[in-house]
Amino acid sequence: MATVWPGRRSTCSSHSLNTGLPAIRGNRFQFGHCPVGKCCRRTFTITNHTCHRFMGFEWEADDPFQFCPKFKLSPVVVQFKDTSPLQTRTAMTDCRTLVLKNNSMLPMAWQLRGLDDLVENFFLSQNNGILDPRSEFEVTLHFKAEQIGSIEKTLRLEVSDAENILGVVQTENIKISAEVYDVSLGIDMPEGADGSLEFGTINVLDKVKKVLSLKIKGIYRIEYRFTLKGAGPRMQDLASYFTVTPQSGMVNASHPDASVEIIFHPTSEILLKNIPILYCQVIDASSGEGGQAVTNIPIRVSAKAEYSKYSIVPASPTDFGAMIKGTKKSRTVVLKNNGTLSFKFHIRREPKLASALESKSSKQGESAPSAKKRSKGRKSGSSTQGHLRLGMFTVSPCSGSVHPSRMQLIKVECLAEQEGTWEEQIYIDIMDRDPTDNPLGIPFTLIVETCVPGTYCPQCPWSHLLLIRLVENVTSIFKEYPICSSADLSHQLQSVKGTGLFVRDENRFIFSKVQVGQEAEAHFSICNACRLPCDVALSIKPLPGEEQSLINNIFKLDPVKMSIRGSSSAVATVTFTPPDKQSYDCTFEASLEMPKG
């Protein structure tokens, strides 16, 4: 139906039509695209060269099948850019893009309904709008995963003309599905008291293995990758201490378990106490090519490696001092474990250096002891399982094990069988000690000096009876007085200034120039040049065949007994008080009672 209405009138001229509009072509009026139910108006001018008259035409398109072009009921096309379902890990977000396309020549209104039925995890970038002709528009649907499970929802797209004259002309149901899953990897390991991976304390160059059990808690594939990271400037080369096998792998629903071996094999002393040096990277293998790293799980490690710690008391050398031949003496050497691990020890004689260097121990700290002995004229050594004999020394036990903070008493016995000064050397080999600590063994020296009583020894003058008539070593005994011969006695008596003098060839000490009733003292030095202490008994006796009463109160001795330390001397004092003017004689004796040892 068409309606013509008058416009502004003017002077008309006849037989001329000029619209000036592209709507008139070949006596046809083109109204263009008209929406259903809306009036379309066009105005044009008919000119007859004498007057102008404006005419208006109106077309009401009330029948969609009787005007051109025909309108299709499905002008909007809906599609997703990514048609894959939403598969999202917990605490992650994902999105899909909904593309609306208007293929018609008219603007269209659109609106998404059903938003109230969606859970709070979903939200749209826009839920309504106007779509221009021949254009498209993207709507983004966001999803935040919070709870594990599957979600099935439906959105309804309603399309209408831009002015909503005809109402909804098209509906589309949009199905939305989402699956929330968790990438979770459980690690079961032998834990210490602080929750760390506990390796305990081992010796350097030993090794200990721990096994981690990995278990997947979901249905999707998970990749894992272990790395070692230093916890400080002194712990950069952790690969020389730990080995992880395998370093990487995959677990899934069909193979949900995996085992990973961690081997601790220290090459030097190290202490780790609840330190995060091992990391397990968890990768979501379902997140496309190469996967996506989900987390990096730190694993705290506690481990300690140390060498054997020990002390030996007394320190080398152990000196038995002076001993009388045929006597026996013992000493105790204490070997203490100052570490936290037990260790074994062996006591050996001098090793053969060549064989010790050629033999390679399975452990760097285990070695064969060696050093050069300094013995003189000793017998060759022998050993049994529990004893080691070297010269005059016997050591027991010569092997054993010492627990932490415990001690091993090592007995060393000396049987003085030969005269002289003797020196032997034993070697204590402590397993798993620092290889720089005497790698061929810890040398320990034993020393003894053996003396024979009853015969004269230049170093042991106490082994004689020391008499006034003694001829040996008189210089040390009478060091305060002149010493002369009988031929020179008269001259010496006239010139002597002291209490007296000693006549060497007569073995006689003479008090000179002593007045009647006055006291004169003579000092005799008793020397012990040996290292053994000794007890000496002193006495003054009358000459053979004379009575004791002849010298009573004339000669006095102090002391009558003395103890002399080794390599020292003591002084005996003889007091002479003559009652009359005459000659008096006596014998001074010094005798060994019992040497101390």
Image (cartoon, rainbow, N blue to C red):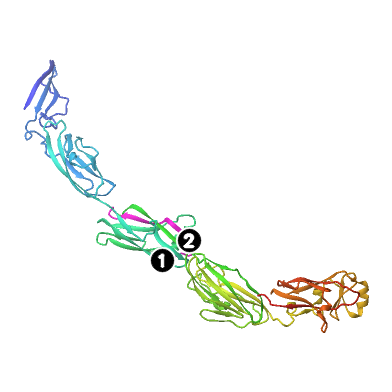
Q: Please tell me whether residue 73 is drawn above or below residue 44 in the rendered image.
A: below
Q: Is residue 61 magenta?
A: no
Check residue 270 in the rendering and tell me which mark sits there, or answer none: 2
Horizontally, residue 95 falls left or right of residue 402, namely: left
* Secondary structure mainly formed by the magenta segment: strand
Q: Is residue 269 magenta?
A: yes
For residue 290, say whether it is visible. Answer: no
Q: Which residue is mark 1?
A: 208
Packing grade of label 2 (10 A; few <14, some 14-19, many >=20) is some
Residue lying at the far front of the rendered structure: 549
Relative image position of residue 584 (x, y in whole percent) = 87, 77
Kindly state the secondary structure of the residue where label 2 is placed: strand
For residue 194, say whether it is visible. Answer: yes
Horizontally, residue 141 falls left or right of residue 11, namely: right
Relative image position of residue 33 (x, y in whole percent) = 14, 32
The kind of residue tagged 1 is: Val
Q: How many marks?
A: 2
* Residue in the foreground of this view, choosing between 595 and 107: 595
* Residue in the foreground of this view, choosing between 196 and 153: 196
Question: What is the span of residues highlighted in magenta in the rendered image?
Answer: 264-288
The kind of residue tagged 2 is: Ile
Horizontally, residue 214 falls left or right of residue 468, namely: left
Q: Closer to the N terminus: mark 2 or mark 1?
A: 1
